[in-house]
Image: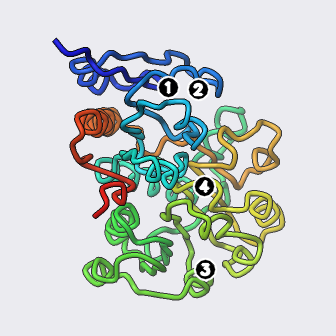
Amino acid sequence: MLAKPKVFVTRVIPEAGLERIRQACEVRVWEDELPPPRDVLRREVAGVEGVLSLLSDQIDAEIMDVAPNLKVISNMAVGFDNIDTQAATQRGIPVGHTPGALTETTADFAFALLMAAARRISEAERYVRAGQWKTWGPMLLMGQDIYGATLGIIGLGRIGQAVARRARGFDMRVIYNGGSDKAARELGAEARSFEEVLAESDFLSLHTPLKPETRHLIDAEALRKMKPTSVLINTARGPVVDQRALYEALASGTIAYAALDVTDPEPIPLDDPLLTLDNCLIAPHIASSSVRTRTQIALMAAENLLAGLEGRRLPHCANPLVYNE
Ligand code: GLV
């Protein structure tokens, strides 16, 4: 019998995914809550043919070069900015990711952040728990209406479109910059320049991958173009926003509110000034975290991994150039 291929899984993932991998591979799992430190990662990948990584693992050329037998890197996320895909392509290593399965769950969460920011839900909850609720207040925690407001979407891709669909149910006007014009027509979303989206949005939701050209897309200048009543929602990647500039904008009233599922860095350090602001809601990168979706993306990551180990084309490949097509 042929020896099973060796793989390293960088954290405990939903059991269905691990089970699928165990059927075909000899698996080592990093069981800590925290990601494997760099030296551990280097050591663990050295002898393996496959790695299942998470978005908190930096998989770069140095890691690939200590793993001469590496046939596949499978990232359990739709985003893959943590992986040097160019280095992987140069080495003929396909990189898997998990698009599609988490679209609706992530859009649900983006909308939950939008609603929580508009209606100040986390502030209200803190208020109650702190014993500050003394009576019904005619002006207590007044927020903003969602219905009838303008939602700006930066990046009308899979997740951006799913957010736009939710917005329609709330009678919102949807404008967008970047993404599918065809989908926009079906959704009744209006194309605008980046500057127009900034200026016209009551809620601005980011759905762009992190690339060199989207790093600090929302900087001080962009924030200055937004309405003072506007709300910024980020479920994309932390570095798409210049966090220092965001702090200044929230503290000075340049914009009204931010609701972030992603920060730069992650986790956000406890002394980050954003954490001192009442008008900033921060979640620990959980937009795709429903039981069903996390199980499904674990299975997708397992399928990508197994395909790569068997030399088959990955069902979801982030660097298709590796196939020389
Ligand atoms: C989560 O952020 C993902 O990219 O799947």
Q: Which mark is residue 198?
A: 3
Asked if labels 4 and 3 touch by Cβ distance under 8 angstroms, the answer is no
Judging by the rendered image, the residue that carries numbered circle 4 is 259
Which residue type carries mark 4? Ala
Residue sticking out furthest to the left: 1
Which residue type carries mark 3? Leu
The answer for how far apart the CA atoms under marks 3 and 2 are is 43 Å
310 up-or-down from 325: above or below: above
The quadrant in which the C terminus is found is bottom left
The answer for how far apart the CA atoms under marks 4 and 1 are is 37 Å
Q: Earlier in the sequence, mark 3 or mark 4?
A: 3
Q: Earlier in the sequence, mark 3 or mark 2?
A: 2
Q: Which mark is residue 42?
A: 2
Which residue type carries mark 2? Arg
Circle nearer the viewer, 4 or 1? 1
- Position in image of residue 268 (x %, y %): 70, 41
What residue is drawn where x is 41% and y is 33%?
70
- Is residue 57 visible in the rendered structure shown here? yes
